[in-house]
Image: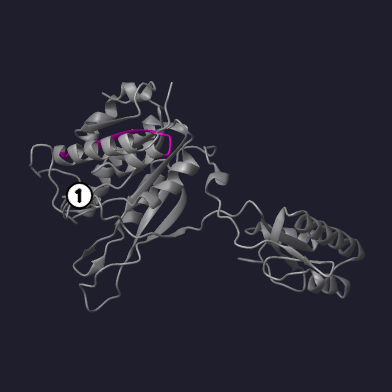
Amino acid sequence: MFNSVLSGQKEYELIAGDSNIVLKQIPDNSIDCVITSPPYWQQRIYEDYYGTIEGILGSEKKPEDYVNNLLQITREIKRILKPTGTFWLNLGDKFYNKCLMGMPWRVALAMEKDGWILRSDIIWDQMKGTQSCKDRFRDIYEHVFQFVKSNKYYFDADAVRITPQAEAHETDGVIISATGVSGKKYFSQIENSCVLTPSEKKTAYGALNETLEEMRKGDVVDFRMVIRGEQRSFHSENVRISGRAKELQDKGYYIMKMRKKGFLPSDIWRIVPEDKWRKDAHCAVFPEELLRIPLLSTCALGGIVLDPFSGTGSTVDAAVKLGRRGIGIDLSGKYTEIAKKRLKESTEQLTIYKFG
C-alpha cells in the first residue's frame, strides 16, 4: 500500500481509509514530515468512504472528546515520525454558545502533555473572509503549529530565507547600511559613554569596525547596535530570562546583523486560501504557498511527507513537486479520487524529482 513509497520505488501513494487504522500499519520512525489539517470540531458535516458520518472526528458533542480522539492520531504520528522529523498541524477555532472555544490551544497543550515539543505557532492570516456576526470582530486567521519529538531535528533555514531588498553601499568613503546606518552615532555614543569602562569601549570599537568591514565586503547589509546606558535591551532587561540583557551586562553592548543571505520568515504568514481544488463546503484546501515553507525547511529532498487527512491531495501534490515523496490518507473515497487526478496532472506536466 505505502511500502513502495517508503522504499523509494514510488513518488506518492493516496489511500482511502481511516487514519486510525492505516497509521498503525506504518513502521516506527519512518516518516520525515507530517503536514495536515484534521476536521475541525463541529465545523462541517464529514462523510467517510461509505457515506456515513457517525463517529467521525469533528462530530463529537464535547470539545474534550474531540481533543482525546485527535490525540489518538497524534500519538500514532509521533510513533512513525523520525526523531529528526517535524509535525505541522493546522487548526481553526470554533464559537459555541457565543464563546470562543480555543480549540487549537486545547489540542496543542494536550499534545505538550503527551511529550511533543511545540516550536512555533504560525498565524495564518488568510487575508479575506466573511462577517456573519454583528457583535464581534471578523476572524480571518488560523493556527499552524510546528511540533517536534526531539530537541535535534532537521531544519534547513537557508532554503526559506527572505533575501533583503537592498544592500549596503559606500558613499564618499563611508559605508552605509541598507537602511542608512553608518555607525557614526554608535562611535559617538561609545566615545562619550560614562557607563562603559575603557576596556569595554575598546572592545565595542573593535566590534563596530568589524561589522562595518563585513558590510564593505558585502556579507552584512544592515545592523543595529545596543550600548549599555544608551539603548534598552530588546524584550527584557532581566539577565535571567534574556540572553541579550546578559550580553549587555557582560560586554556593555551587542550587535544585531542582517546578513546578505537573508532572514527567516516571521510567524505570521499572509496567504490567501486556494480555490482551484475547492469542490464543495467540505473541502478546505491548503494553498500551495502555505505548504512550501514547511516542506523546504523541515523535509530534505527525497524525504517522506505524510498527510493523514489529505482531502484533495494538496500536501502530497506540493511535496512531489518539490522533490519529496508523499503519502495521503483520507476517509473519503470521492476526495481520494480527486487527489489522484490532481497528482496525475502534476506528474504529467512537471519534471519531478526521481528516486532510486
Q: Which residues are magenta?
A: 322-332
Viewer-proximal residue among 282 and 348: 348
Tell me if residue 14 comes above or below residue 4 in the rendering.
below
Quadrant (top left/top right/bottom left/bottom right) for the N terminus: top left
Residue 175 in picture, x, y percent from top left: 79, 65
Q: Amino acid at mark 1?
A: Gly
Q: Badge 1 is on which residue?
A: 58
Q: Is residue 73 magenta?
A: no
Which residue is rendered at x = 71% and y = 56% of the image? 220
Using the rendered view, name the quadrant where residue 354 is placed: top left
Viewer-proximal residue among 285 and 90: 285
The residue lying furthest to the front in this view is 349
Using the rendered view, name the quadrant where residue 218 is placed: bottom right
Tell me if residue 35 comes above or below residue 22 in the rendering.
below
- For the question of whether residue 268 can be seen, the reply is yes
Residue 273 in picture, x, y percent from top left: 31, 57
Using the rendered view, name the quadrant where residue 68 is placed: top left
Residue 282 in picture, x, y percent from top left: 17, 52
The residue lying furthest to the bottom in this view is 135
Q: Is residue 330 magenta?
A: yes
Quadrant (top left/top right/bottom left/bottom right) for the C terminus: top left
- For the question of whether residue 117 can be seen, the reply is no
Relative horizontal placement of residue 235, taking residue 304 as reference (left or right): right
Which residue is rendered at x = 36% and y = 49% of the image? 288
Viewer-proximal residue among 108 and 169: 169
Instruction: Describe the element under mark 1 as helix, strand or loop.
Output: loop
Which residue is rendered at x = 24% and y = 43% of the image? 312
Q: Crowdedness of circle 1 by 10 Å Cα count: few (<14), some, many (20+)? A: many
Which residue is rendered at x = 39% and y = 45% of the image? 88
**Colouring scheme applied when the structure was drawn:** one colour
